[in-house]
Image (cartoon, rainbow, N blue to C red):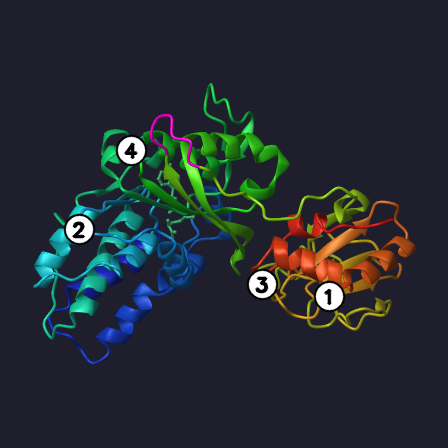
Amino acid sequence: MAYRTYVAGLRDLAGELRRSDDWDERAFAALNGQASLELRRVIPLKRRRRFGAFFTSSDLAARLISRCSKFDEHSIIHDPSLGMGDLLLAAARQFPLGRTLNKTLKRWGRQLTGTDIHPEFVEGAKTRLVILAQQRHGLKSLGVTSIAGLFPGIRVADGLAQHRALARVTHFTLNPPFGLTDAPAGCKWAGGRITAAANFVVTSLERAKPGAELVAILPDVLRSGSFTEQWRKRVEALAAVRLVEPYGIFDESADVDVFLLRVARRAKNSAAKSVQWTSAPVQTGTTVGDYFDVHVGRVVPHRDPETGKNHPYIHARCVPTWKIMRNFTQFRRHEGLVYRPPFVVIRRTSRPGHPYRAAATVIAGKKSVAVENHLIVCEPKDKTQTMCKKLMRQLKTKAVNEFLDERIRCRHLTVSAVAAIPFQF
Ligand SMILES: C[S@@+](CC[C@H](N)C(=O)[O-])C[C@H]1O[C@@H](n2cnc3c(N)ncnc32)[C@H](O)[C@@H]1O
């Protein structure tokens, strides 16, 4: 695939014999986001979705690794779906250096393991680990001309079909593919179609040794969905859940809410307690989800082609908060889903502690409206503006702010958090 050319460029960077003036700059880019940007540039979204190829940013990867227990010289880190190695890179940034570049590469090669089904990613991941080691050593002469023989535990393979190698692993790091797949035959914790991510977590834990830790970036639906409860029960049977941290949207290219998970594989008969999956206060009354259908707006501005019917268009910067919006100044063509007023929109981005976590607007008028994906849409089930105004009033209360601060600490509101807001009819 076209991505091979990019990986060949990384190889050249690692193979340069002398450090040129701009080597550090190029290495910094290669280790921070460029691999993901390049993938987005050369591979269409549909294909990336099919393979679940969305690489973790260095910030999010560092955050995930900081949630692990400390590494030492006996730690073996394993990423079963390693992509371009962003999680292993974040782990390697915590490792000490050897006396020479060769010694560092040898030691890292023993401790960092992983699999991916795409050979170009596996080669890219190994090469980036070499570049990280070169960068951290800061030598004037570099030149690792071949990666053959380096990182023997990083291989082209199906991450779900590994057995023996996993018994040595002390830390699993995962951002697995999120796409839907058939539940494994005979699976007791899911039936029909499930997110592949659920399967990666359970399979890794089933093969892990007692005490092994697993940290993962996972779709929020596994944390909060009612139909994923059996999966959570299976995870709790295999491991003690130590941390469940809502994060928000993965990045601007993959519009999906994620959370961070840390669990430790149980020893037989261990009764170690798990933390709760959601920290929401116990709810007895009705919620927004009982009266409204809640979705994320469908327009992704820089991705969606401006074709199809022309519609009024709203985005987070043009909707006036706490008002009824009837007149529209912006229009765009959009072929995907549009919404017929009346409905309420809520800005997805909010900060814990800000005066209003769920800043809302009632959208009125007669024409169907195209809504940007930084807005959450609440369509009243009874289709009335009265219900919309009622919701807008209730969203402005201290009780709702406190509920959201408690339920979701990250900046981005999720559909499930909005649907769970207490709402009195
Ligand atoms: C969401 S990406 C994440 C990559 C990397 N862990 C990261 O955090 O940047 C998931 C990766 O899983 C790989 N993948 C998909 N199915 C796989 C399988 N059965 N075994 C191993 N890797 C797989 C894809 O090629 C892709 O690189």
Examine the structure image and report whether residue 268 is included in the region drawn in magenta: yes
Q: Mark 2 or mark 1: name the one nearer the start of the chain.
A: 2
Label 3, secondary structure: give it: loop
Mark 3 Cα-neighbour bin, 10 Å: few <14, some 14–19, many ≥20? some
The residue range painted magenta reads 266-272
* Distance of label 3 from label 4 (alpha carbons): 36 Å
> Alpha carbon of mark 2 to alpha carbon of mark 1: how far?
49 Å
Q: Which mark is residue 411?
A: 3
When the figure is inspected, residue 312 is found, relative to residue 415, above or below; the finding is: below
Give the Cα separation between the discs numbered 4 and 2: 18 Å
Q: Position of residue 388 (x, y in %)?
A: 85, 56
Who's the residue at 63% across and 59% down the image? 405
Local packing at callout 4 (Cα closer than 10 Å; few below 14, some 14-19, many 20+) is some
SS under mark 2: loop
Seen from the viewer's position, the closer of residues 419 and 209 is: 209
Q: Residue at x 38, y 62 (%)?
A: 58
* Image vertical order of residue 158 relative to residue 33, above or below: above
**Residue at label 2?**
73
Q: Distance from label 3 to label 1 (Cα)?
A: 13 Å
What is the crowding at mark 2: few (fewer than 14 residues within 10 Å), some, or many (at least 20)? Answer: few
Disc on the earlier residue, 3 or 2: 2
| Secondary structure found at label 4 | loop
Label 1 Cα neighbours within 10 Å, binned few <14 / some 14-19 / many ≥20: some
- Whether tag 1 and tag 4 are in contact, CB under 8 A, the answer is no
Give the percent coordinates (x, y) of residue 104. Answer: 13, 58
Residue 12 showing in the rendered view: no
- Counting residues from the start of the chain, the first of labels 3 and 4 encountered is 4
Mark closer to the chain start, 3 or 1: 1
Q: Check disc 4 and give the amino acid type.
A: Lys
Give the left or right position of residue 424, taking residue 272 as reference: right
The answer to whether the residue labelled 3 contacts the one labelled 1, judged by CB atoms less than 8 Å apart, is no
Which numbered disc, 4 or 2, marks the residue that appears first in the sequence? 2
